[in-house]
Image (spheres, rainbow, N blue to C red):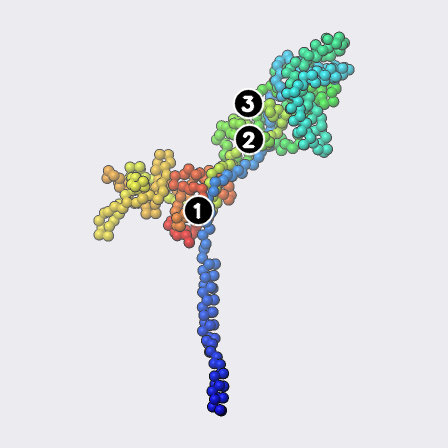
């Protein structure tokens, strides 16, 4: 009985497994930590190659310039006093002997002319009047009260413009049919030209009078509408007459613009306000230590007849093409080679290089050219296996030694996983980026990948 109890107690004993020794686990943890430290060290100490994807883009770094408008113009003054009324729309051409305005002493013509103008306004003339009203509503500000008189003038000018030069004749007919005894004096243009009813005090300036100080006054010009009150006295400005289609813009050039334009005869000009562009003949001269340019044209004179300064751009600092960072650009040597030493084998340009065999005999090596280009009918080639002093063989047995070379700008393309030099043609460059041509032979295309900083790399280096 006692023995049976002892056997039962022995069966109730649970044996515990022994755990591994702490030393092995610690050693494994230490190995993993050491491995991570080595990986981190390699990551932070090794130089990493940054890759840039080439894309089509454009750069425009043009700085708008304020140009002085120079015309053949003169202000015509009245030689008597009275109430003035006009018969020619602003911006219209007037011939010598045409009636421009009349003067009367009692302002009796004003209401009569208003009726005639209203009669001349048909359905086709209402649209431009509405457009002028909408423009005024959208831009009017109480701080610019003078805009109100300009608006009134613009409406009258539209009506004048559509009277087609018959307003004075219609007035005479109306006076005759009414039997009215109206006294007025008519004034004719002494010469032909284009009419303007604004003055600014700069009409008498000539090219030699325009200085850099003059150009700095672009924001302080005060344009005045002539005879705004309706009554004039002797000596008041009646109108301005521009007598030639030829006009010019005087502008100051900074050193960069001067270098780009000094050998040019013409330049493309764009007016910033409305995007109008035109070609202008170019004359550069000095005013003290400043470079001034006279840009002359015979187009759009009427469009800017009331402007004394225009904000313009040349478009010289603008280009469209492939955009790359300047840091990617490096230079490589290309060797000048006569074309008879270049063969086309399997659609690849190939040269035959003379080499020395191990036994001292002379042999040849066919080299597929990595890159080439032609400039001024001279072919240049490049390959890492070519160096100055190497001798090439032609198909006819001629020999040519590589000696003349030139540097060519390019980048390292890594599309294939290793550095491949590809030449570039820079169209425009600023401080950070360049715009290059997408038509360069053996050059880049959109979405190619290039090295941002190739200073530590060489040809055929693999990129991880």
**Which residue is denoted by mark 2 in the rendering?**
270
The answer to whether residue 181 is left or right of residue 407 is right
Disc 2 secondary structure class:
strand
Disc 3 secondary structure class:
loop
The answer to whether residue 464 is left or right of residue 155 is left
**Which residue is denoted by mark 3 in the rendering?**
298
Determine if residue 232 is in view: yes
Q: Give the camera-side residue of 90 and 393.
A: 90
Label 1 or label 3, whichever lies nearer to me, is 1
- What is the crowding at mark 3: few (fewer than 14 residues within 10 Å), some, or many (at least 20)? some
Q: Position of residue 376 (x, y in %)?
A: 37, 34
Q: Give the camera-side residue of 340 and 53.
A: 53
Q: Position of residue 328 (x, y in %)?
A: 45, 46
Quote the CA–CA distance across marks 2 and 3. Answer: 15 Å
Total tally of numbered discs in the picture: 3
Residue 403 sits in which quadrant?
top left
Q: Residue at x 64, y 18 (%)?
A: 162
Disc 1 secondary structure class:
strand
Q: Give the camera-side residue of 325 and 167.
A: 167
Label 1 or label 2, whichever lies nearer to me, is 1
Determine if residue 198 is in view: no
Q: Which mark is residue 449?
A: 1
């Amino acid at each position: 009985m006692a023995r049976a109890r002892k056997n039962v107690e022995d069966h109730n004993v649970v044996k515990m497994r022994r755990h591994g020794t702490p030393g092995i686990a610690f050693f494994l943890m230490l190995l993993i930590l050491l491995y991570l430290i080595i990986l981190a060290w390699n990551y932070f100490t090794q130089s990493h190659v940054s890759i840039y994807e080439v894309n089509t883009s454009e750069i425009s770094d043009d700085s708008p310039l304020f140009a002085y408008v120079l015309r053949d113009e003169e202000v015509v003054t009245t030689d008597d006093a009275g109430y003035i009324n006009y018969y020619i729309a602003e911006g219209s051409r007037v011939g010598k002997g045409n009636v421009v305005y009349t003067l009367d002493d009692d302002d009796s013509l004003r209401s009569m002319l208003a009726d005639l103008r209203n009669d001349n306004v048909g359905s086709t003339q209402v649209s431009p009047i509405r457009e002028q009203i909408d423009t005024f509503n959208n831009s009017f500000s109480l701080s610019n009260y003078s805009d109100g008189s300009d608006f009134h003038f613009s409406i009258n000018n539209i009506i004048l413009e559509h009277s087609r030069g018959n307003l004075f004749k219609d007035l005479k007919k109306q006076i005759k049919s009414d039997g009215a005894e109206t006294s007025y004096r008519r004034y004719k243009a002494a010469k032909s030209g284009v009419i303007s009813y604004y003055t600014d005090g700069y009409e008498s300036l000539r090219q030699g009078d325009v200085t850099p100080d003059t150009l700095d006054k672009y924001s302080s010009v005060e344009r005045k509408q002539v005879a705004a009150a309706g009554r004039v006295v002797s000596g008041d400005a009646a109108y301005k007459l521009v007598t030639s289609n030829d006009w010019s813009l005087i502008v100051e050039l900074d050193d960069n613009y001067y270098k780009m334009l000094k050998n040019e005869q013409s330049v493309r000009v764009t007016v910033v306000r409305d995007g109008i562009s035109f070609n202008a003949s170019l004359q550069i001269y000095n005013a003290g230590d400043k470079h001034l340019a006279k840009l002359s044209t015979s187009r759009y004179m009427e469009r800017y007849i009331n402007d004394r300064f225009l904000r313009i751009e040349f478009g010289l600092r603008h280009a469209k093409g492939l955009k790359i960072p300047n840091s990617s650009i490096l230079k490589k040597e290309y060797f000048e080679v006569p074309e008879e030493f270049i063969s086309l084998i399997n659609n690849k340009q190939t040269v035959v290089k003379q080499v020395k065999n191990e036994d001292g005999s002379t042999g040849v090596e066919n080299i597929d050219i990595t890159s080439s280009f032609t400039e001024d009918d001279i072919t240049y080639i490049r390959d890492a296996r070519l160096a100055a002093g190497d001798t090439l063989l032609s198909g006819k047995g001629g020999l040519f030694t590589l000696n003349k070379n030139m540097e060519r700008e390019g980048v390292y393309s890594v599309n294939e996983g290793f550095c491949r030099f590809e030449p570039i043609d820079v169209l425009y460059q600023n401080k950070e980026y360049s715009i290059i041509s997408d038509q360069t032979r053996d050059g880049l295309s959109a979405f190619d990948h290039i090295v941002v900083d190739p200073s530590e790399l060489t040809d055929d280096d693999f990129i991880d």
